[in-house]
Image (cartoon, helix red, strand yellow):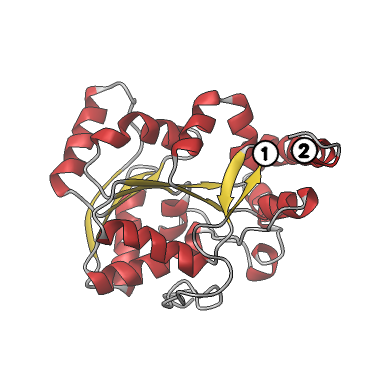
Amino acid sequence: MSAVDTRSGLGREPSVNGAGSADSASELLGLKVQTAQPAELLRQILGYCERGEHRRVSYVNAHVINQSFEIPELRESLSHSDLVYCDGYGVRLAARTIGVPVPHRMTGADWIWGVAALCEESGRSLYLLGSDPGASGEAAEALRRWYPRLEVCGSHHGYFDMNSPHNERVVEHINERSPDILLVGMGTPQQELWTERYFERIDARVVWTVGALFDYLSKRIPRAPHFMSDNGLEWVFRLAMEPRRMWRRYLLGNPLFLYRVWEERRTRRNGGE
């Protein structure tokens, strides 16, 4: 494994000109999803830090979009994000089916190495919030092994109640360290709901929801082989690894997502929105 995934260009400086600027987006099932190259999106996100802006970054996949139909607060949080990118082949399939520009897939286990390299080079700091006790700390150590000068200014697990005194201490801990980028890996919808509630109180330039990223970095969850992840079959691998936890998400969720995509395609072809 290389420290930076050069196949997707996440560790390289992107060009300023050319197709697929970081401002382009497709509307998919009521959500705007960025279609720019991953390297351009990372440059835009790091640009938020450089300009001292306070921004939110989120991702969508088939599961997140399905949940957004069932949980209005999740959809609201996604709509308030400054940048929403694609983290799943289902979203790319949806774009092709509906007939809108297809977004690039930017999965956390790949882009994190590019982010770490860019942060180390520019002196930007990260804070890791989420996952099981110990996992975020192990993820921080994995990043430091590749990037010794990277500043991971703090980490904390995600197992606390949103309305508890523990939650308040976590917010205080983050604000004491004032990271450039806060990575929130609590899983959907908890991470989006937490971000929606506390975003204005968080002293971080960028608040970025990242799903199970820390579990991958800490090796608590194995990654699918490249031939599966590169061909839209990572969900099969995850289902095989965790069938009791994942069967509803994939065996029920995937057909429901495809139905919603087909209905969206039919509505647009009939002239409706």
Give the secondary structure at mark 2: helix
Are circles 1 and 2 on residues that touch, CB within 8 Å? yes
Residue 29 shows which numbered tag? 1
Please state, as top left, top right, bottom left or bottom right, where the C terminus lies in the image. top right
Q: Nearer the viewer, residue 177 or 157?
A: 177
First reached walking from the N terminus: tag 1 or tag 2: 1
Amino acid under label 2? Glu
The residue lying at 50 percent from left, 33 percent from top is 189
Instruction: Point out residue 38 in the picture as x, y percentages from the top left corner.
Output: 51, 65
Mark 2 highlights which residue? Answer: 264
Q: With respect to residue 166, does 29 lie above or below?
A: below
**Amino acid found under the numbered disc labelled 1:** Leu
Residue 124's disc number: none
Q: Is residue 85 left or right of residue 205?
A: right
Which residue is at a point 74% across and 41% down the rendered structure image? 254
Q: How far across and how far down the image is residue 4, in percent?
A: 44, 75
